[in-house]
Image (tube, grey):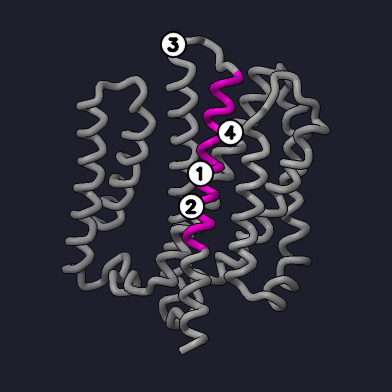
Amino acid sequence: MRGTLTLTSAMLLVVLALVQSPQAPALRTVAVGVLGLALLGLFVALERRAPAPVVRLGILRSGRLVRANLAALLLVGAFVGFQFVMVLYLQELRGWSEVKTGMAMAVLGLDAVLAPTITPLLVARWGNTVVFLSGFVVAAVAYASLLRLGADWSYAALLPSFVLVSIAFALAYGPLTIEATNGVAAHEQGLAGGLLSTSFQFGSALGLAAVAVVLAAVSGPAATIGLDGFRAALLVPVVTALLGVAVSTVTLRRESGLRRD
């Protein structure tokens, strides 16, 4: 119970420090961030001494598991941040209704069709790591294609990027779920799954917080967000996806090295 409470509080404080940074005094932001990191350290100390820890810390010695969780955090963080920016763009700048915006974004659900049909075939042919690495590459291209976002882009201009994002998510999400539990002992599969779920949730919070910070920083005290704010905020998912490419590449190289040995 103490471990769960400490870890949850640590993550909340880290996200809070990020979200409040544009408006709050720097000293308060630093204090909240430091407190969050201190609670994270306390969580580690508690787990080491607990007879029945929430997280057996030894499981984190697996580089494969750690990289899979980091990649999962980056994947969902970029995706959620992108969605938030695009919904604001369509509703606040373009004046679209909630229904029209929802219908426009519905194409992002294409991954629900692709993931169970095409992705397993690609994994069987190319391997798990190559597929989720490809997903991050496609995601980076999709987000980058929106950096020149115009004030009056038609839906036809947005649609290719939306389709690419959906394809990227279909390529990466399932294989990352497999990667996070591969090589984990049967009795710790539940723990590995729990860590992955936590990474997904924490990634969502961080991605949303990061784009909110950029939007607030670029817009300043203005009541409305300008085009420059949306373009700047879209850099967050681009950079996040590129970090995912880097993490996935490390995993691929480690696997290649093991095969050669």
In the rendered image, the vertical position of residue 54 relative to residue 31, given as above or below: below
**Labelled disc at residue 221:** 3
Q: Which residue position holds label 4?
A: 84
Q: Secondary structure at mark 1?
A: helix
The amino acid marked with disc number 4 is: Phe
User: Residue at 67% across / 61% down in the picture?
Assistant: 171
Q: State the residue in front, 257 or 4.
A: 257
In this view, 142 is above or below 198: above
Q: Which residue is at the front of the view, 190 or 110?
A: 110
Query: Residues under labels 1 and 2: Cα distance?
Result: 6 Å
- Magenta stretch: includes residue 236: yes
Q: Are marks 2 and 4 in contact (CB under 8 Å)?
A: no
Disc 4 packing (10 Å; few <14; some 14–19; many ≥20): some
The stretch of residues the image draws in magenta is 227-248
> Looking at the image, is mark 2 or mark 3 earlier in the sequence?
3
Residue 258 percent coordinates (x, y): 47, 84
Residue furthest top as drawn: 222
Cα distance, mark 2 to mark 4? 20 Å
Question: Which of the two discs, 3 and 1, labels the residue nearer the N terminus?
Answer: 3
Residue 256 percent coordinates (x, y): 52, 79
> What is the three-letter code of the residue carrying label 2?
Leu
Disc 4, disc 3: CB below 8 Å?
no
Q: Nearer the viewer, mark 2 or mark 3?
A: 2
